[in-house]
Amino acid sequence: MIEIKNCPVCSATTYSKYLETEDYFFSNERFSLVKCTKCNLVFTNPIPELSKIGDYYETDKYLSHNSGSSGIIGTIYKKVREINLKNKYSIILKFKKEGSVIDIGSGTGEFLNYLSNRKWKTKGIEPSKNAREFARENYNIDVNEESELSNIPNEQFDVLTMWHVLEHVYNLDERMKTIVRILKADGIAIIALPMVDSADSLQFGKYWAGLDVPRHLYHFSANTFETLAKKYNLKIIDRYPMKFDSLYVSWLSHQAMKHSLSLLRGVLSGLKSNLKANKNSNYSSMIFVLNKSS
């Protein structure tokens, strides 16, 4: 395990205990979360060594890496994914009508395939070998390992997307600098994140599936993410909710609490969370659109 000495956002060296939780999704190991006393970022500390983190993704329950998921949950996931693909594309079209896009953490490639079929020039980055191979074999799209990021020339892409990826990245500073470097001067970055201060997070506490330790290293709020963005001269210009996420996360949270009828309870809890978020615009997961500050 690696103990984090400095806050990943502001580099402060003092933080307080936030909560203790478990990897309810897979390993059942216990992990600690702390909160920076300066910028209020919540982050997992300590974390597994980089060489060990891959072990925590090796489960067929990790749906973003497993396009072949079966059963009712897999079926629902695929239907929701179809809706989300349309929603994601509609956001892009509000800012860019055509051009090049890189999807970092592209999974099994459905999003890039959707864009490629609409004449976009696409490139994917995906650490999972199985997911990369699936994307190449089934969609014939350009997907590479994370090491390829360092080989990309400056200002190459009109659009850069990271859908629930940034919270997984070990070297946050390096990744943020890369985002700025490979994005065109007038390009946009679209980053989706779970919100640690959302209504469902506050409801479930240590059982909230959006914590997803140890895979999630950082647990952002809108404020702490904005602090991070400003550090790299990025400006949040728009934001959108991911309303389906609260349903899925609430279902998993009820499962972690070993509640009966967890799926039904999850739907009800998720809907309740969305209703509360309608008032404060702080949903279980949020999509942020950013550009380079002038």
Image: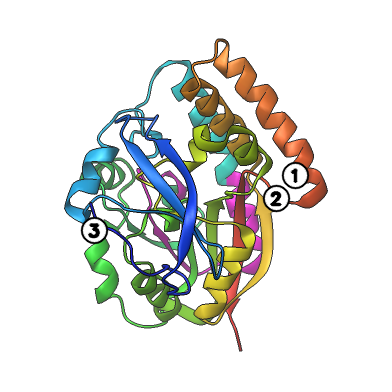
State the image coordinates of residue 28 (x, y, percent, origin top left): 33, 29
Q: Is residue 132 left or right of residue 173?
A: left
Residue type, mark 2 in image: Asn
- Quick one: SS at disc 1? helix
Residue under label 2, please give it: 282
Residue stretch in magenta: 86-111
The residue depicted at 48 percent of the width and 74 percent of the height is 10
Instruction: Indicate the amino acid at tag 3.
Output: Glu
Residue 145 numbered tag: 3
Q: Amino acid at mark 1?
A: Ala
Q: Do residues under tags 1 and 2 come within 8 Å of each other at their CB atoms?
A: yes
Quarter of the image where the C terminus is located: bottom right
Location of residue 182 in the rendering, given as x and y in whole percent from the top left corner:
40, 77
Query: Residue at the spot x=64%, y=40% of the render?
Result: 202
At 43% across and 52% down in the image, what residue appears?
112
Side (left or right) of 181 relative to 144: right
Where is residue 160 drawn, in percent x and y? Answer: 47, 66
